[in-house]
Amino acid sequence: MDAFDRIIKEHGAMVRRIASSRERDSALIDDLMQEILLAVWRAWPGFRGEGSEKAFVARIAHNVAISHVRRASRFKSTPLDERTPDGSAGPEALTDAALQRERLLEAVRALPEPLREPLVLHLEGLTQAEIGEALGLTATNAGVRLTRARAKLKEMMT
């Protein structure tokens, strides 16, 4: 398996979630995924291993997503695609969980961009230092933005 295939396997889900934090329509998410993966493929030879691979991919995903959304025309979106449930809960519980996920994703999308990005990367498991690296911030600044994002999200969800 070559390096790019490994990157897609290890970080593809994170890239999809970052794309989903920007777009609602599944077709637009797929388009954004392609743009991000192409950018990663192009940038990969320049990766010198100075930081984490995950932060490198996240930074590219973040930058491409911003550019994509800025130039994309706004159309009415279709409802969010739901992840496949495990089938262990009844229909009402699954519906409630789906509505809660949709509400949370909408709240995340409504956050101002300087707060949204650190939160999305935190949800992907990046450390404050990796978030700072991905966004071009200090680890302290990333932590401050993350704290503010959590507080704003909590306010929006209550």
Image (cartoon, grey):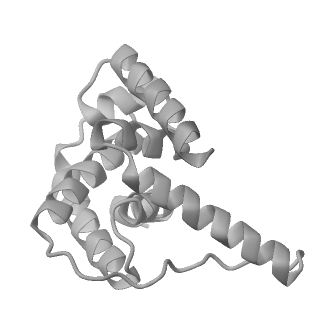
**Which residue: 37% across, 80% down?**
25
Q: In this picture, is 69 found above or below 53?
A: below
- Residue 137 visible at all: yes
- Of the 4 image quadrants, the one containing the C terminus is top right
Examine the image and state in which quarter residue 117 appears.
top left
Examine the image and state in which quarter residue 142 appears.
top left
**Which residue: 23% across, 29% down?**
136
**Which residue: 29% across, 43% down?**
113
Residue 140, x across and y down, in percent = 38, 14
**Which residue: 34% across, 84% down?**
27
- Residue 49 visible at all: no
Residue 115, x across and y down, in percent = 37, 36
Specify whether 134 is left or right of 119: left
* Depth order, front residue of 8/21: 21
Specify whether 44 is left or right of 109: left
Q: In this picture, is 86 found above or below 55?
A: below
Q: In this picture, is 7 found above or below 135?
A: below
Examine the image and state in which quarter residue 123 appears.
top right
Residue 15, x across and y down, in percent = 40, 60
Task: Farthest residue to the front: give it.
Answer: 158
Q: How many marks?
A: 0
Specify whether 56 is left or right of 103: left
* Depth order, front residue of 32/144: 144
- Of the 4 image quadrants, the one containing the N terminus is bottom left
Task: Farthest residue to the top: give it.
Answer: 140
Residue 12, x across and y down, in percent = 44, 63
